[in-house]
Amino acid sequence: MQGKSMKDNAKIGYDQLRYLMLPYYDFDGHVQKGELVCNIIIAHDLLCVFRDLFSEQYPICSIRLVDDFDADDEASMQANNTSCFNYRPVPGMNKISRHALGLAIDINPLQNPYIRGSKVHPATATEYVDRTKDFPYKIDKDNLCYKVFTSYGFTWGGIWRNKDYQHFEKRR
């Protein structure tokens, strides 16, 4: 993590983070083991969320550390990777992301892009911008992922002015 997702100037220490190993069902219905780093504040809630999603066989493309992508958030999203901690700014802004504190997670980001004006992240997700269309793995208010995360007190970025359909976060 050092020099990748954890930067030298980070306003968070390793003692505030937890490493989780999570079973999940991939898009082919196979059980996989995922890795996630998150803030200690949400670690228990994330274990419960992923337990609930796993028990319902909710499909997730992959759950790998963003370090596997050299902490390149765009590369991780283009690979449709679910991730949490990455000490980085909000795309296009000068403030740190909730991911930088390990308090936010992105789920199946390719099908659930972040949209700010005409910018789409990941850039390869333009076919998923129109949320009136029906397609697999889309998170909306009727989706199990939304229901489970919000039941544990997470806020969904899909209700924001700049839509972030992949994003769930908790405030301290």
Image: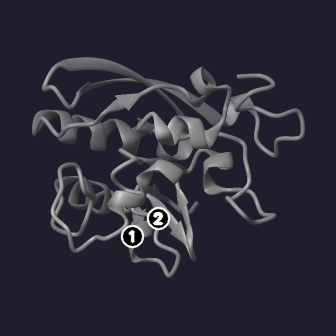
Earlier in the chain: of badge 2 and badge 1, it is: 1
Residue 83 appearing in the image: no
What secondary structure is found at the residue carrying circle 2? Answer: loop
Q: Which residue is drawn at 23% across and 35% down?
A: 51
Residue furthest toward the right?
9
Q: Which amino acid does label 2 sit on?
A: Asp
Task: Using the image, determine if residue 48 lies above or below residue 166.
Answer: above
Residue 152 appearing in the image: yes
Residue furthest toward the bottom?
161
Could you tell me which quadrant the C terminus lies in? Answer: bottom right
How many circles with numbers are drawn on the protein? 2
Q: Are marks 2 and 1 in contact (CB under 8 Å)?
A: yes
Density class for disc 1 (Cα within 10 Å; few <14, some 14-19, many ≥20) is: many
Q: What residue type is labelled 1?
A: Gly
Decide which of 170, 83 is in the foreground and name it.
83
What secondary structure is found at the residue carrying circle 1? Answer: helix
The quadrant in which residue 151 appears is: bottom left
Q: Could you say where residue 52 lies in the image, as x and y percent from the top left?
A: 19, 41
Q: Residue at x 18, y 50 (%)?
A: 136
Decide which of 95, 70 is in the foreground and name it.
70
Q: Could you say where residue 100 lies in the image, as x and y percent from the top left?
A: 68, 47
As drawn, is 103 to the left or to the right of 82? right
Instruction: Name the mark on residue 164.
Output: 2
Instruction: Name the mark on residue 125.
Output: none
